[in-house]
Amino acid sequence: MLPLIIISVLLAFTSATPCDTQGSNGELLLSLSKSLLRSLEGQGTLPNPSVHLALRLANSHNLAKESEHLNQLKNHFHNDIQNSLSNSQAVTGRLALYAMALKSSCYDLNTITFTVSGARETLLTHLKRQMEQEKEHIAFSHRPLTNYYQYSLGTLALCVNGIRVNNHVSNKLIKATQHQHFTHGDAESIDTFAMAGMALQCVKEAGSYVHNAAELNTALAQIKQKLLAARRPDGHIGNEYSTGNAVQALLAMGTPVAECAASMEAMRTDARGSKYENPMASSQILPALHQTSYLTLKTKECLDEDDTLVLEPIDPVVVLPSGTTVTVIVEVVMSSGATAQYSVDVPKDSSLLEALELLATGNVGFTFEKETSLWGPFLSAVNGELARQSDRRYWQLSSDGTALSQGISDYKIGKPQKITIKNSTY
């Protein structure tokens, strides 16, 4: 009898560990929320709806700052989408995140409109139209106008806002799961599997998919198995930056919290080691560490919220240059296969973006252009050659043969290395 009692106690302790919102885990959650709040201060880029989502799905709030950020979204982010719509650009992902951010603040989406060609229509009407365009593009080209990650986001945003998702739209996502179309370049995209899982789970719970319920269940089972199979020995699912979405999806699909304990601990370890300094990365792990997912937006109520999250004043930190430089070899591989190599000495711990800027000012024939995104700047052109989403091309980055999981402003140069920039397709 005694061994059974001991086992029961151990199991109870194990199950409780990921649920610990007191002590060090609770302090970490507050620290992540505070970091996201600080990222809103003096930001020179567009307000980020993903950051707003994370703050609103957390337990502790600073309602004044969240309200201020919501107003920024309704102005600056709204205007950015309006400009894109006016220029007939695909904005499925941004519309979806905007819709979910508004929903997280219990805002009436029927009051949010965009005007295109003289017609004024609501945000959700535009999102539905974007999804129809994506669906039609899949029908004749076997891929979305944007990508399956944005397509999944669009499906999820409609669903959590109580909009019935067209069966043909959700069926395209089911078929893409069956045929394993969730790839980025040559690799499977764990983020896309995760977002598709949340979207299809929402459709299932809404009871709106009438084509073939068994087919929907099979797709969800395939996604769940794919996420579980992608778990590494260190607990990450895919990589450090896909684990947050993956855990959200697993929880949404009914996986017990205890089964995600290793992945949650991996994210906690990364967070304590300042791995998620990029606000976009933090915004995707915070809901997972709160043991929730974007699906909870369906029943989100903004009542009696904890308003105790306060930012303490901090002294500015001055980082002095180390005086140490490292040599970086930059290899550029064009779409034709032609290559060029350059060398530049940069201060140790410079970002890759800073290294490229130094190289470009050295008058050695290297040039580049960048564009902004919610993840930060990304390369759009190198040596005059474009890599555009409309052409399904991107600049693939690797260091000494290992693909980079961070963006050009986040990746730090800590040692001599060879950076390869390759024009690739997805």
Image (spheres, helix red, strand yellow):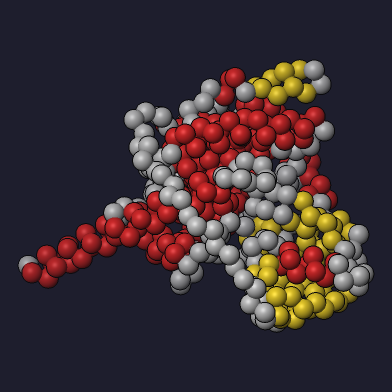
Query: Can residue 310 be seen in this snapshot?
Result: yes
Count the labels in the image.
0
Q: Nearer the viewer, residue 131 or 388?
A: 388
Left or right: 13, with 297 as reference point: left
Q: Residue at x 40, y 63 (%)?
A: 265
Q: Residue at x 66, y 39 (%)?
A: 94
User: Residue 61: image x %, image y %?
Assistant: 41, 40
Query: Can residue 167 be seen in this snapshot?
Result: no
Image position of 356 with respect to 279: above or below: below
User: Residue 151: image x %, image y %?
Assistant: 65, 42
Quarter the N terminus occupies: bottom left
Left or right: 9, with 294 as reference point: left
Q: Residue at x 45, y 71 (%)?
A: 234
Image position of 399 with respect to 390: above or below: below
User: Residue 122: image x %, image y %?
Assistant: 65, 22
Image position of 58 with respect to 75: above or below: below
Image position of 114 with respect to 256: above or below: above
User: Residue 172: image x %, image y %?
Assistant: 65, 41
